[in-house]
Image (cartoon, rainbow, N blue to C red):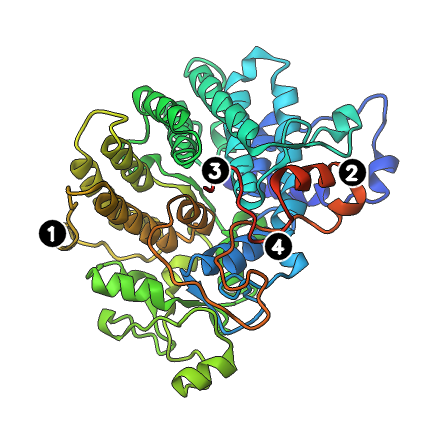
Amino acid sequence: MIRKFLILLLFITTLGSCTKDFKTINIDPNNSPKVPLDYLLGQTQLYIGGSAGDPGYATWRANLIYALPATQMFSSLSTFYAGDKYIYQADLSEAYFVTQYPESVKGLVDLIHQASADPKYVNILSMARILKALQMSIITDLYGDVPYSEAGQGFLTTNFSPKYDAQKDIYADMLKELDEAGSALSASAYIPAKADFVYGGDVTKWASFANSLMLRLAMRMTNVDPANAQLWANKALTKGVMTSNDGTFAIHYANDGGTATMNSNSFNMGPPSRAEVAKGSIQWSKTFIDMMKSRQDPRISTVAYLKTGDTTAANQKGLPSGLDAGLLMALTGESGADAYSRPNPILWDLKDPYILLTYAEVEFMKAEAIERGWFPGSAATEYAAGQAAAISQLGVDVGAPVISAGAIAAYQAANPYPGTTLADNLTQIHTEIFILEASTLNGFEGWANYRRTGLPVLTPTNYPGNATNGTIMRRLIYPVSEQGVNANYKTAVAAQGPDLFTTHMWWDK
């Protein structure tokens, strides 16, 4: 039944991408057909995962090309992989903006509008509101001030030039939405189990995810609005966040009905599509591999391998960031990247889940909240739970080996919670988050968390002709098209600052 649902959803998604004359020829304007809300819910989840629409376009450019390399998780000798070299290329920088607004954001606004009309669909409505907060948090954390309150409403209001909302206001509304939508979920109302590729309609898990995302957004505000950060973090933890890896937010794929049923990161990294890993375009960075080796991390053989297929931990070697082939030759005498570690195929199986928020991350954030005195408990206990969950989390990937309890305990013993100064404790917490987000390929959160905390400490690169004068990127640049089609672009730039990689957004202080 689920397979039939995926095939039908793929058919609907494909039709949705055909936007030429069929819109006006085949639709009766006086009696327009409506797609069932279940299918819209499933479709928007696939859009957020980047597998529907133009498969992998947004995630390839925003996540694999910019976010992961900018944070020195990935490295590449290709200048197309611009993130570790701070190179501006318009089509790469704008990709997430120009695809996700007309796809996921528009779809979610439509779904919220339709579901609001019938109390029967309170769970679909709540899930859509939570999904919108998730997607908009990614978009605003990539670009800063962005269209929000008027976004995706062109078909409802004919406003095709939405205003750019201040990030501060976007955060305030997302937190409100998560609070209200999470509380409105009801086990006694209609549950769209087959249309939900994340939790299969489990409203308890949806509620804990809403609270966990609330905690993430609260922690993001730590440096700019600590009072509200504490208030919302406390609320999220009191209401109830994820309690196990089963609560991790991940879109699940069957790989049995075309590209919409494939993990978009995997679509880009492996065959039968772009095969970027096999091409030698993507390597693990020296920063990441050295960190794992120094911490005796048992995950290294699961996440990394050499071109020869060798997964031996001691043999893994990270590629220095910010180089091309010529610079690597000058530095090391090596003519290419073949000697350097690549992401293990375990991480890019087409059925692997697309992970956006893990229980392990929640445990590390909880440890920080406790450390700051925002919530009662033991920061050391939550930190250790986060370590165990992060290592076990890799088990969701197809073919991943089980890492033993003994290996997890040995890792915890080698990397204990300092329990001394706030600075030392935060360094340990956010080093763990860095490794977690890299190993789950969540560059969006890895880059955002680094910009919020400055941890772990990274040495910037200074590639010739880079766009930041050798400083780590703080945001992506808006689409070039916005300058011509949306007069609100100039207002946004005037409010936030120059439309450059180096401009800090509201929470990035």
**Which of pointers 2 and 4 lies earlier in the amino acid sequence?**
4
At 39% across and 66% down in the image, what residue appears? 284
Pointers 1 and 2 in contact (C-beta within 8 Å)? no
Query: Could you tell me how far apart the alpha carbons at marks 4 and 3 are, in whole angstroms?
Result: 20 Å
Q: Nearer the viewer, mark 4 or mark 3?
A: 3
* In this rendering, position of residue 184 left or right of residue 61: left
The amino acid at mark 4 is: Ser
Pointers 4 and 3 in contact (C-beta within 8 Å)? no
Query: Could you tell me how far apart the alpha carbons at marks 1 and 2 are, in whole angstroms?
Result: 56 Å
Query: Could you tell me how far apart the alpha carbons at marks 2 and 3 are, in whole angstroms?
Result: 25 Å
Where, by quadrant of the figure, is residue 173 drawn? top right
Q: Which residue is mark 3?
A: 507
- Quick check: 12 above or below 331? above
The amino acid at mark 1 is: Ala
Pointers 2 and 4 in contact (C-beta within 8 Å)? no
Where is residue 108? Give x, y as percent.
61, 30
Q: Which residue is mark 1?
A: 413
Q: Secondary structure at mark 1?
A: helix
Numbered badge on residue 487: 2
Pointers 1 and 3 in contact (C-beta within 8 Å)? no
Q: Which residue is mark 4?
A: 93
Other residues around mark 3 within 10 Å, as few (<14) / some (14–19) / many (≥20): many
* In this rendering, position of residue 325 left or right of residue 317: right
Q: Secondary structure at mark 3?
A: loop
Q: Is residue 255 visible?
A: yes
Quadrant containing the C terminus in the rendered view:
top left
Other residues around mark 2 within 10 Å, as few (<14) / some (14–19) / many (≥20): some
- Quick check: 198 above or below 201? below
Q: Secondary structure at mark 2?
A: loop
